[in-house]
């Protein structure tokens, strides 16, 4: 009886030691993620140029689009596509509006599970909002602050039937690339480049 | 009681019984048809149809405030779910995508017949190339995820095109799956009742159903904090129900208050409960006979006839007052004499009869009115007054208990006589000079206000408080519902012909949107194009060989390969041979609900409604002339603009003019009657002068207070003449009999006090129609008495 109890105790101690041994790495990663979120959250606004390649099985070759991406804390994101066709997609809170030429229409983000993950993966990352990210996606952090990768998988089954994964690469508070993998294998890769006017606090249009 | 007298009472009882049967069997309606013309012109008929049955008259706008957005949404969903199962409602919309699958299927299946973009040009090589380039750009946009599965079947984007066509009709923003106001603070819901908007009882049931659905939704477990949510409803049905309730409440409250006050006065005066009860017999008989007469003469009795009728025959309370008090005059001084024992009939009755006939002349002038409400009021008061006078004359004396007495009012009468004596000692020229002065002042005021003397808007009769009207306008704006006022109506013999003309009318209206005359319009053709239009679209679809070749050429150099678009070729070929889209195909879709609301099938054919939306919500009036000239340029035969406000105001103005004409005729009849009955122009003018002066003074006072006169003020003026003529005739009789008689004066004082109390109370009702009557009659009756006491006697 007594020996057995000792055995149990040592087993428990061994498990504890194992956990203790494993902890530093995990703690480092989570600390890096927290630090990254703090860095991102500290940026109140930003403007970058983007070039996006859309790979669709339906199309013979990828289609490229490009434009400017604007973020304003806490919840405004605007994607101004200039090529091949001018169109502006802007999200404030739960309101999404799409403007193309003189026409514009507004949508309720909550009603469009297909668009939600696209928008929120970028916006919550730019805002350093880990709470929102973790609510919508399972979040996987890889690398370190100087070069990191966030892998986001939608939690909602309906959203997953459109978007199976979003991968965001960055260096410190800068986002470098956003790759979106759709459920049917179509994917898009968006490369971001610091916009010349970003450093200015009064960006000129 | 002699045999003859017994017969009289028996006849009275029989008449009452018969009237009771007629009144019990009568059909009572409480809708707005009281305000609608008896023999309408075709345009008025259209107006009446719209006001009664039109889709806009059946809309209930519902707003949910309070608590948080999620709770509001949950309550909205639960309410809509319950109301959709309720047969009282034809459609319930809160922005939930309940028919979204049906809608998508319908649009997708019929895309080549529904899309406005389907033209021969679209299916040329260049047209195809442009459409495909657009689609490739769509695929690179965030919407691409949702669209890509459609592309092999619909590479020209007709489905998206149709969705865009339909989104021209604005809908409120959606949040948490339901419609909300632009600021997100309210959840919005739109319910359409099955019953006509004019069916106030049914509307009341519908509103009750909405309230119950709200209460049930608040009890539902999924709403977290339901008790913070508040319900607001608006719309024509809500207005009708509120208006009726307001009037009913005011009438009941004021009748009770007025009756109690008058009872207190009469009890104080008579000191006899029997006298009080017996005194009510003439007016009660009059009321019952009045209803019976209306039931006999009209297909149905309007609610307003019941509401106002009794106030109009209030004069008959005076009859019993005159009877009780003046019968005493034959008694020796200081002794309470039994009533009814004197030959009072010879003295009192001819005067009372002439007063009654004068009133009847006045009210009879309402009988030919095209405004059924007024005509019924005329019939009610004429028959009611005659009945009340006859009861006072023949029945009341028979019912008095033996030895029946009331308090001696001689001291009160003598007091009034002394007061009048002071006036009488003034020289006639002074009194008449004073009257002339008042007359000139009144005429001057009326002349100054001549432009704005009459209110020509039907809304002036609306018992709906202004804040409620503003709230309605606000909710309407938020829901993107048309203002319910401006419609283009297309009439025709067949559904196809009205759809074709609705399409042409739509083309004529389109430029007005750019010119900012209107913000837009809805049309049944947006949901179901005419077969003509469908055929034109089908004719634009090329045969398979040509389409294949064109597609080959169009895709050259594009990222999209023609080989991917085989389903497109098959679908186009199917669309070239399939059946036309019919109203049947719309069933079960939200488009079908939209279509049904805008297509009316009447006995004479079909009507298509194109409600117009105002360009500027701050200025709700649409420039009718520009809309009309746009329609005229398009040479459309069966199309006309119907501005419900303008038409109903025009209708009301017609009524007003007619009522003024008829009352003038009634006044002339009174002049002739008095001239004949009094055998003297001088006597007649002495009787008429105080009445004319009282009416003009009241009208001038109202105008000076910036009150615009309505048709109810006019009825009030008739009442002044009706009540006042009794006063003047009694003074005339006193004059002939040689001086003041204290009992007659006392009875006039009591009668006038009762009238002023009864109508004075109406002035505080808060219901415009009742206030109009009260503010006219209460001061008018008092002035009529005052003027008559001075002007009618000769010396």
Image (cartoon, rainbow, N blue to C red):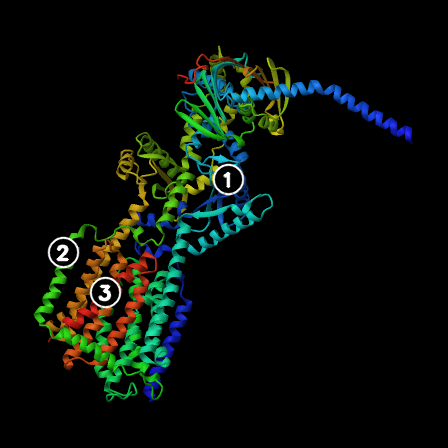
- Give the mark nearer the N terminus: 3 vs 2: 2
Q: Quadrant of the C terminus of chain B?
A: bottom left
Label 1 or label 2, whichever lies nearer to me, is 2
- Give the mark nearer the N terminus: 1 vs 3: 1
Residue farthest to the top, as pictured = B557
Viewer-closest of B458 and B228? B228
Mark 2 packing: few (<14 Cα in 10 Å), some, or many (20+)? few
Residue occupied by mark 1: B587
Q: Please report, as a chain letter, where disc 3 is located.
A: B
Q: Quadrant of the N terminus of chain B?
A: bottom left
Residue occupied by mark 3: B780
The residue that appears at 54% across and 44% down in the rendered structure is B75
Q: Does residue B67 appear anywhere in the picture?
A: yes
Q: Position of residue B597 (x, y in %)?
A: 43, 42
Secondary structure of residue under mark 1: loop
Give the CA distance from mark 1 to mark 2. Answer: 65 Å
In the image, is residue A135 above or below residue B565? below
Mark 1 packing: few (<14 Cα in 10 Å), some, or many (20+)? some
Callout 3 and callout 2 share a chain: yes
Q: Position of residue B3 (x, y in %)?
A: 34, 88
Residue occupied by mark 2: B444
The residue that appears at 75% across and 22% down in the rendered structure is A19
**Which label number is shown at residue B20?**
none
**Dot 1 and dot 3 residues touching (CB under 8 Å):** no
Q: Please report, as a chain letter, where disc 1 is located.
A: B
């Amino acid at each position: 009886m007594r020996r057995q109890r000792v055995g149990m105790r040592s087993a428990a101690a061994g498990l504890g030691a194992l956990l203790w041994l494993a902890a530093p790495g995990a703690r480092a990663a989570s600390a890096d993620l927290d630090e990254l979120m703090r860095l991102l959250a500290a940026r109140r606004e930003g403007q970058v140029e983007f070039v996006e390649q859309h790979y669709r099985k339906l199309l013979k070759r990828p289609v490229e689009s490009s434009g400017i991406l604007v973020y304003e804390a806490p919840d405004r994101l605007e994607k101004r596509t200039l090529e091949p066709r001018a169109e502006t997609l802007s999200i404030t809170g739960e309101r999404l509006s799409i403007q193309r030429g003189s026409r514009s229409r507004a949508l309720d983000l909550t009603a469009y599970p297909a668009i939600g993950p696209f928008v929120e993966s970028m916006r919550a990352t730019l805002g350093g909002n880990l709470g929102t990210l973790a609510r919508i996606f399972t979040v996987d952090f890889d690398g370190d602050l100087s070069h990191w990768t966030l892998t986001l998988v939608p939690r909602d089954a309906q959203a997953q039937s459109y978007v199976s994964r979003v991968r965001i690469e960055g260096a410190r508070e800068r986002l470098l690339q956003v790759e979106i993998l759709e459920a049917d294998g179509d994917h898009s890769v968006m490369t971001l480049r610091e916009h010349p006017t970003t450093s200015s606090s009064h960006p000129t249009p | 009681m002699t045999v003859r007298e017994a017969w009289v009472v028996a006849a009275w009882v029989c008449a009452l019984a018969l009237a009771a049967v007629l009144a019990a069997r009568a059909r009572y309606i409480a809708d707005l048809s009281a305000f609608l013309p008896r023999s309408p012109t075709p345009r008025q008929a259209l107006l009446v149809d719209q006001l009664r049955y039109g889709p806009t008259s059946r809309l209930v706008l519902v707003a949910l405030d309070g608590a948080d957005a999620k709770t509001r949404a949950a309550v909205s969903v639960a309410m809509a779910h319950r109301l959709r199962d309720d047969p009282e409602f034809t459609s319930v919309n809160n922005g939930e995508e309940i028919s979204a699958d049906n809608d998508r299927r319908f649009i997708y299946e019929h895309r080549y017949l529904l899309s406005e973009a389907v033209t021969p040009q679209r299916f040329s090589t260049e047209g195809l190339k442009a459409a495909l380039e657009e689609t490739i750009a769509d695929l690179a946009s965030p919407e691409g995820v949702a669209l890509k599965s459609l592309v092999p079947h619909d590479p020209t984007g007709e489905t998206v095109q149709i969705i865009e066509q339909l989104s021209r009709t604005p809908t409120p923003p959606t949040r948490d799956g339901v419609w909300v106001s632009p600021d997100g603070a309210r959840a919005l819901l739109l319910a359409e009742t099955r019953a006509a908007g004019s069916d106030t009882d049914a509307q009341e049931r519908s509103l009750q159903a909405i309230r119950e659905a709200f209460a049930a939704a608040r009890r539902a477990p999924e709403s977290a904090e339901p008790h913070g949510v508040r319900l607001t409803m608006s719309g024509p049905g809500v207005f009708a129900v509120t208006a009726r309730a307001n009037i009913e409440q005011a009438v009941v409250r004021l009748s009770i208050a007025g009756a109690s006050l008058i009872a207190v006065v009469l009890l104080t005066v008579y000191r006899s409960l029997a006298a009080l009860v017996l005194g009510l017999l003439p007016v009660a008989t009059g009321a019952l006979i009045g209803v019976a007469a209306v039931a006999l003469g009209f297909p149905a009795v309007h609610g307003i006839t019941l509401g106002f009728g009794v106030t109009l025959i209030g004069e008959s309370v005076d009859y019993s007052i005159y009877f009780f008090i003046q019968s005493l005059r034959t008694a020796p001084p200081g002794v309470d004499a039994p009533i009814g024992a004197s030959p009072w009939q010879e003295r009192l009755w001819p005067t009372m009869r002439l007063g009654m006939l004068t009133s009847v002349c006045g009210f009879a002038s309402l009988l030919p009115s095209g405004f059924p409400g007024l005509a019924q009021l005329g019939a009610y008061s004429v028959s009611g007054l005659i009945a009340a006078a006859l009861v006072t004359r023949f029945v009341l004396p028979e019912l008095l208990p033996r030895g029946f007495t009331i308090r001696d009012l001689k001291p009160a009468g003598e007091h009034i006589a002394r007061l009048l004596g002071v006036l009488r000692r003034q020289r006639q020229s002074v009194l008449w000079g004073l009257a002339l002065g008042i007359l000139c002042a009144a005429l001057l005021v009326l002349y100054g206000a001549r432009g704005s003397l009459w209110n020509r808007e039907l809304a002036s009769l609306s018992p709906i408080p202004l804040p409620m009207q503003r709230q309605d306008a606000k909710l309407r704006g938020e829901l993107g519902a048309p203002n319910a006022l401006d419609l283009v109506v297309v009439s025709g013999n067949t559904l196809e012909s009205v759809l074709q003309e609705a399409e042409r009318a739509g083309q004529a209206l389109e430029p007005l949107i750019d010119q900012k005359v209107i913000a837009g319009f809805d049309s049944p053709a947006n949901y179901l194009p005419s077969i003509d239009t469908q055929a034109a679209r089908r004719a634009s679809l090329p045969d398979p060989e040509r389409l294949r070749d064109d597609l080959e050429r169009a895709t050259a150099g594009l990222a999209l390969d023609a080989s991917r678009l085989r389903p497109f070729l098959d679908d186009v070929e199917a669309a070239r041979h399939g059946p036309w889209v019919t109203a049947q195909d719309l069933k079960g879709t939200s488009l079908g609900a939209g279509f049904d609301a805008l297509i009316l099938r009447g006995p004479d054919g079909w009507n298509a409604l194109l409600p117009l939306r105002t360009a500027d919500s701050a200025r709700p009036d649409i420039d009718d002339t520009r809309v009309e000239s746009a329609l005229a340029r398009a040479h459309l035969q069966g199309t006309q603009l119907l501005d419900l406000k303008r038409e109903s105001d025009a209708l009301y103005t017609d009524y007003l003019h007619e009522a003024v004409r008829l009352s003038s005729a009634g006044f002339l009849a009174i002049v002739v009657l008095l001239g004949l009955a009094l055998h003297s122009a001088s006597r007649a003018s002495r009787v008429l002068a105080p009445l004319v002066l009282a009416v003009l003074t009241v009208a001038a006072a109202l105008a000076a207070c910036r009150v615009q006169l309505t048709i109810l003020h006019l009825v009030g003026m008739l009442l002044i003449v009706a009540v006042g003529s009794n006063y003047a005739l009694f003074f005339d009789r006193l004059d002939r009999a040689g001086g003041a008689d204290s009992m007659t004066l006392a009875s006039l004082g009591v009668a006038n006090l009762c009238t002023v109390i009864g109508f004075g109370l109406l002035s505080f009702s808060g219901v415009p129609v009742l206030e109009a009557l009260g503010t006219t009659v209460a001061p008018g009756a008092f002035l009529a008495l005052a003027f008559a006491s001075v002007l009618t006697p000769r010396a």
